[in-house]
Image: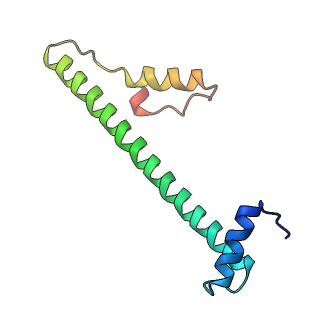
């Protein structure tokens, strides 16, 4: 692979090789790419964690609202067979085999 770098970056690579830290320009580029890769992986993990934490906080709020409404008598009985039939119909999935929960 041949890479052309802008002059300031080429100078930096040359300085790294001359310092003895790296044997050649390929090692400098490889080290830089590994550092970049690791940083991206770490940032991605942080974003996933933040997304998970935000979603968990959202779920906690929604559950608290549901519990509060149930305590005030505002809840309704859940029609599980109806929910299953509706989901199958909405997604174009053939109805499941007759199951005891479908009554």
Which quadrant, please, contains the N terminus? bottom right
Please name the residue shown 16% across and 13% down the image. 73
Q: Nearer the viewer, residue 94 or 63?
A: 63
Q: Quarter of the image holding residue 12?
A: bottom right
Residue 65 falls left or right of residue 89: left
Residue depicted at x 33% and y 21%: 78
32 in relation to 90, above or below: below
Q: Is residue 85 visible?
A: yes
Above or below: residue 45 compared with residue 55: below
Image quadrant where one finds the C terminus: top left
For the point 83% across and 63% down, the residue is 4
Q: Position of residue 87 (x, y in %)?
A: 52, 25
- Front one among 101 and 53: 53
Whether residue 7 is situated above or below residue 51 in the rendered picture: below
Left or right side of 21 for 68: left
Classify residue 56 as left or right of residue 5.
Answer: left
List x then y, in percent, for residue 48. Answer: 45, 48
Q: Position of residue 34 (x, y in %)?
A: 61, 69
* Of 30 and 102, the residue lying toward us: 30
The picture places residue 54, in percent across and down from the top left corner, at: 36, 37
Toward which corner of the image does residue 50 lie, by quadrant?
top left
- Residue 63 sits above or below residue 35 on the image: above
């Amino acid at each position: 692979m041949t890479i052309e770098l802008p002059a300031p970056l080429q100078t930096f690579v040359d300085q790294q090789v001359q310092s003895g830290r790296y044997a050649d320009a390929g090692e400098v580029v490889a080290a830089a790419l590994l550092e970049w890769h690791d940083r991206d992986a770490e940032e991605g993990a942080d974003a996933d964690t933040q997304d998970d934490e935000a979603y968990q906080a959202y779920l906690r709020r929604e559950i608290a609202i549901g519990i509060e409404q149930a305590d005030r008598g505002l809840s309704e009985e859940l029609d599980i067979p109806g929910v299953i039939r509706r989901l199958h119909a909405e997604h174009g999935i053939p109805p499941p085999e007759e199951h005891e929960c479908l009554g």
